[in-house]
Amino acid sequence: MINVTFLTADGEKIKTQGLAGSVMGLAVEHDVPGIGGDCGGVCSCATCHVHVAKKDLARVGEASEIEKDMLELTDDVSEASRLCCQITLSEDIDGLEVKVVRE
Amino acid sequence: MQPSKCSNNHQEPLRCDSDSVAPSQAREITTEKCPFSNFDENKVGQFKDSFSLLRQNQGFLDIDDQNDPVKMVLGLKEVRKAAHNWNLFQSEAKPGRIVVPSEVSIRDIRQIPFELDPPSHKYFRSLLEPWFKRPSTLEYQDKLGAIVEHVVSQTINDGTAHKNKQNSYDAVTDIALTIQSRALSVLLNVPMDEAKTWISWGTHVFRSNDNPLDAEKADVLYDYLDAQIQKAKGAPRDDIYGLLLNAKVEGRALSDEEIKGILVLTFAGGRDTVINSLTNTLAYFSDNPDALNFINQHPEHLNSAVEELFRYFSPLTHMGRVATAEGEVAKQHIPDDSRISLCWASANRDETVFDTPNNLVLTRKTNPHVAFGFGIHNCLGATHARALMRIWVKELAHRVAKVDVIEATENIEQWGGVKRKVGFQTLLVRLTGRV
Ligand code: HEM
Ligand code: HEM
Ligand code: FES
């Protein structure tokens, strides 16, 4: 099991676990507020915007060019921004913490 | 005769780009066959990129429209940037002006939230968004599922048909219009019987086929909505009329005109777009029966397949904006108070972003398309449209072995010198069930 913790805009902490898919998929499964996942994860809607915890930035890795182009025009973008449908669940990211940007 | 260079069976559309019309040679696309091609030159499920040369050469297309010209923006990044910049490129212009062809001379009523900008846009979006997110619930999707199942059962040839059942159906009216109207009754939470009235209006609520600016056509809808709003004032209701009549925006109730401006959009914005999505999908499957099997056997690709269908069809070609000051877009000077448009259809074939943009790739994983727009005005009906298309594609894949097109009349738009196929006027089909 891979653990991911979401910190919502309201300050609520939601702990989740999953085996496969994306971080967005996990959030939708657990009704995490602020993660819409409207496009189902094809990087078209930007409703899955998160800020990755500093400690996790390196292991989560960089966004692709396409994702960066999307983020560039998204509100509240920062160095830590990712569209979490583009983060695949794997052992490498076990214990990941992300902050949900939208309410 | 096939030169070796061209032996890729036209899998590399970038090189020849005969789909497009160059600015210097603005001409109609001929039906003349490529001397080196040996494929069906006009497949019914093929939707060419009409903008590719213009997009690559200059990035925009000038359109003349009732003495209020429009600079159409063609590249994905430029389209997104301009959509993002709502301050400079506004929607809250004179009602009807951001629509092309302009509806300024035929209506005064403002469509909401479509023709508003922040801050009022935000108040209305916040009011409407929870309602328009309902399609993500299972209960809602079950209702859509029943509607789709019923129409497929009525039109499929699977050996269970009773005697006087027709053999073929017009996908536009018999199938898509019926599904779209019944599904809209679920979105508005009104009795499904209302759909009968909407179906009787035909496929175009605002635009008659011969005259795109026929105001009388719109009157039918306005009169209907006036009557419904008055009726809804009588009793508490759990439908969209009830929601809007009880709602407060900035501490005040909505006017009847505002309510109408919201409702009108659910009919206008969600009609042709959904009908074309459903119909074009049948045309695609008629050319590609293997795709039905593929999706049936790989339901995990349903979502990417549907997103790709939206990208490929781009049911809403473009939408306008009005400049609030001098500006620049696609390296072009934009005068104050002039019009631009954001061409979602062209952006969705941008070869600098999408690999093989003119191929419909059901498993396309990263697909940053703008079929539902981009930025604050992104489509409010997208959750509904996506849910409906996922159910539609899944049901077809599950039950249909092949789709035969018997007769097709394409629906071709004309934008400046460019023609674009957006769907069909009629598409006579026969659906053969799986055994
Ligand atoms: C890599 C090589 C080529 C490819 C992939 C290719 C591909 C295509 C395609 C996809 C079409 C559209 C057919 C349709 O409308 O259904 C087309 C049309 C056409 N091609 Fe080619 N072609 C190639 C080479 C050539 C060459 C070398 C010539 C001329 C010497 C040529 C002349 C034409 C003409 C005249 C048309 C007709 C239609 C129009 O004006 O739109 N093609 N080609
Ligand atoms: C496949 C179907 C559909 C497509 C491709 C589509 C496409 C679009 C696009 C591109 C926009 C952005 C317009 C702009 O930026 O000015 C938009 C906005 C909108 N659409 Fe859709 N649409 C579809 C279905 C629907 C449905 C079913 C409804 C409602 C019943 C709807 C209601 C709206 C509304 C209200 C807006 C304006 C949102 C705003 O301004 O905040 N659409 N749509
Ligand atoms: S879910 Fe749509 S961009 Fe991530």
Image: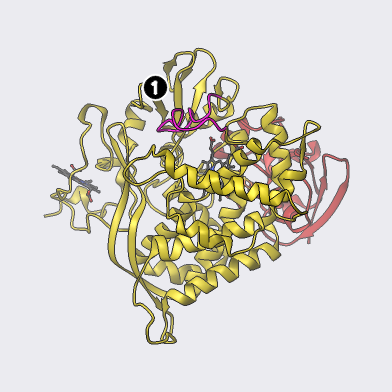
Chain colours: A red, B yellow
Identify the chain of the residue marked 1, using the numbered disc in the image.
Answer: B
Q: Can residue A53 be seen in this view?
A: yes
Q: In this view, does A23 lie above or below B282?
A: above
User: Which corner quadrant holds the N terminus of chain B?
Assistant: bottom left
**Left or right of B174 on screen, residue A13:** right
Residue B127 figure quarter? top right
Q: Can residue B240 be seen in this view?
A: no
Residue B275 figure quarter? bottom left
Q: Which of B11 and A55 is in front in this view?
A: B11
Q: Is mark 1 within 8 Å of ligand 2?
A: no
Across and down, in percent, residue B301 comes to 54, 62
Seen at 56% across and 54% down, the residue is B385
Q: Is residue B428 above or below residue B88?
A: below
What secondary structure do most residues of the magenta stretch adopt? loop
Across and down, in percent, residue B332 comes to 41, 18
Seen at 41% across and 59% down, the residue is B279
* Magenta part of the chain: B93-109
Q: Nearer the viewer, residue A60 or B205?
A: B205
Number of marks: 1
Seen at 50% across and 22% down, the residue is B322
Decide whether residue B358 is among the magenta residues: no
- The residue beneath circle 1 is B68
Dot 1 crowding, Cα within 10 Å, few <14, some 14–19, many 20+: few
Decide whether residue B108 is among the magenta residues: yes
**Left or right of A69 on screen, residue B211:** left
Q: Which amino acid does label 1 sit on?
A: Asp
- Callout 1: SS: loop
Across and down, in percent, residue B111 comes to 57, 36
Across and down, in percent, residue B410 comes to 30, 53
Seen at 34% across and 37% down, the residue is B51
